[in-house]
Amino acid sequence: MIGTGYVGLVSGVCFSDLGNDVICVDNNLNKINDLKNGIIPIYEPGLEELVKKNYKNNSLKFSNDLNDAVSKSDIIFICVGTPTKKNSNAADLTQVYNVSRQIRNSINKYKIIITKSTVPVTTGEEIEKILSQKKSKNLFNVVSNPEFLREGEAIRDFMYPDRIVIGTKSKKANKILRNLYSPLISKGSKYINTSRKAAELIKYASNSFLATKITFINEIANLCEKININVEDISIGMGFDKRIGSRFLRPGPAYGGSCFPKDTKAITITANKSKVNLSVIKSVIKSNENRTSLLLKRVFKILQNKINKKNICFLGVTFKANTDDMRDSPSLSMIPALVKKGAKVNYYDPTGEKSDFSKLKNVFFKKNIKLALHNTDLVIIHTEWNDFKALNFKSLISKKNFAIYDMRNIYSPEKLKLANIKYFGVGR
Ligand code: NAD
C-alpha cells in the first residue's frame, strides 16, 4: 500500500487481517515511526486494535522505503492523496504520478499496479505511459480499483463492501484480484469487472450522486423551514420509496470531508474537457458552497444580529462523527466568520484540539463538554457524535437565556420546548 492515510492504512490492515502479507509505505517518516510504535495517526474506530494485532503477527509492516516494498510485492495499491489543484477545480495528480515514477524503478517481475486513490478518467492510461517508458508492458498491468469506504465506518465498509469494482481488461490481473477479494465476495459483496475508464468514472459518479442527494434534501429543508413543515416527515415519506432509499436524506450543514467537495469539482473538469456540461453537479457544488452562509444567517437571526461578545459553543468540529478529519469541514468557515463578528467561540470535539483554529483569536478548545458549554449563549451542534445526544443543557449551562441550534436534528423540538429551551433545528 503506497500512502498510509485514511484509505491506505485501513485497506492495508484489512488486507493483512484477511491473510495477506502487507507493507504500508509512506514518505512521512513520523507517521511510519509512530505506526511502528503503536501510535495510530488517525482516529478510526477499531483501527488501533487491528493494526496492533496484525503488526504483532508480522503480516503488516510499515516502511518509508518505497522501492524495497514495491520490489517485494505482487500487488501495489496507490493510495496517495488527490486533492483539488490550487486555483482550479481539477484533481491534483502530482502525488499519483510521483509515486508511479518511483514504482517504475522497482518493477523486477510481473506486478499489478492499482489506483485505489480517486483519480480522473484516463489516469490509468497516463500511469501506464509512465511505467512503459522504462519497463516492458508484459511486466505489469495498471488497474483501477476505487475505494468506497466511509471514514468513521471504514473497517466495516472495507470488510463488507456493497461492491468491489475492478477496472481492467487483463484476464490475468482480474483473476488475481478476484482471488485477493474472494473472502469478501464469499460474504456477499458484488464483484464487478469493467473497463479501467469506467471504474475510474464509477467512483466520481457515485460520490457526485451522494453529494446531490444531500444537497437535494438540504434545499428541501430550506423550503420546509419557510412553510413550517418538518423535513423529517419528508425524508421518511420519500425514503420508503425503494427507488429513492432513505440514506443520505438527512439535512444538515454543507457536505464536507476529503471526498465530496473535491470529487464533485473534479468530475466537472473531466466533463468540460469533453465539452459536456454536468449542470446538475455544478449546481450542487454552488448550492453546497452557499449553504454555510445560509446557516450562518440563521445563527445571526437566532442571536438577533447581536453577535459581538456572544459566547458560542460548537459541539463537534469535524465534518462528520467518528473521524478526526477536518478537511473541508463546514466549521472551518463558520467559526472564523463568527469570531470576525465579535463572538467568542468555545469548541469541544471528541478527537481533540484542532490546529486549524490555533491562529484564530477568541477560539478556545475545551477539554470536555461541560467546560465548553458553561456560560454559553448559543450551542451549535455541528457534528453528530453520540456524546452529544443526551445532554442536560439546563444543568450544564449557567446562562438562563441560551439557545440551541441543532444542525443535525439530534434533539426533539417538542421536548426542548417543554423544557423551556430556545431550540432551532434544520428544516423544522
Ligand atoms: P491521506 O491524505 O489521508 O493519505 C495519503 C497518504 O499518502 C499520506 O499519508 C501521505 O503522506 C502519503 N503520500 C503522499 N505522497 C507519497 C509518496 N510519494 N510516497 C509515499 N506516501 C505518500 O488521503 P486519504 O484520505 O487516504 O485519500 C487517499 C485517496 O483515496 C484519495 O484519492 C481519496 O480521494 C481517496 N478516497 C478517500 C476516502 C476517505 O474517506 N478518506 C474514501 C475513498 C477514497
Image: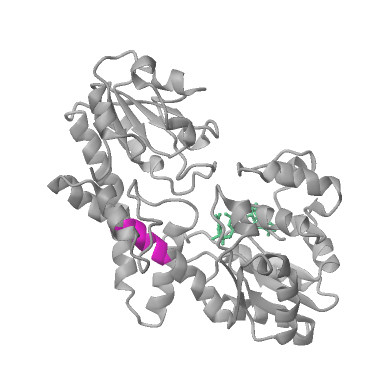
Q: Position of residue 287 (x, y in %)?
A: 28, 57
Q: Is residue 318 left or right of residue 3?
A: left
The answer to whether 264 appears left or right of 53 in the picture is left
Quarter holding residue 407: top left
**Residue visible at 75% across and 73% down?**
179
| Residue 115 appears in the picture as rendered | yes
Start and end of the magenta stretch?
A: 208-216
For the point 22% across and 38% down, the residue is 298
Instruction: Report the front residue among 132 and 401.
Output: 401
What is the x, y in percent for residue 208? 41, 65
Q: Is residue 102 visible?
A: no
Viewer-side residue, 27 vs 208:
208
| Image quarter of residue 73 | bottom right
Is residue 85 placed above or below 407 in the rendered structure? below
In the rendered view, would you say 55 is above or below 102? above
Q: Could you tell me which residue is drawn at 79 percent across and 57 percent down?
A: 23
Q: Taken as a whole, is the magenta stretch helix, strand or loop?
A: helix
Q: Residue at x 44, y 71 (%)?
A: 205
The image quadrant where one finds the N terminus is bottom right
Q: Is residue 213 magenta?
A: yes
- Report the quarter where the C terminus lies: top left
Relative to 395, say whether 338 is above or below: below
Q: Is residue 131 above or below residue 294?
A: below
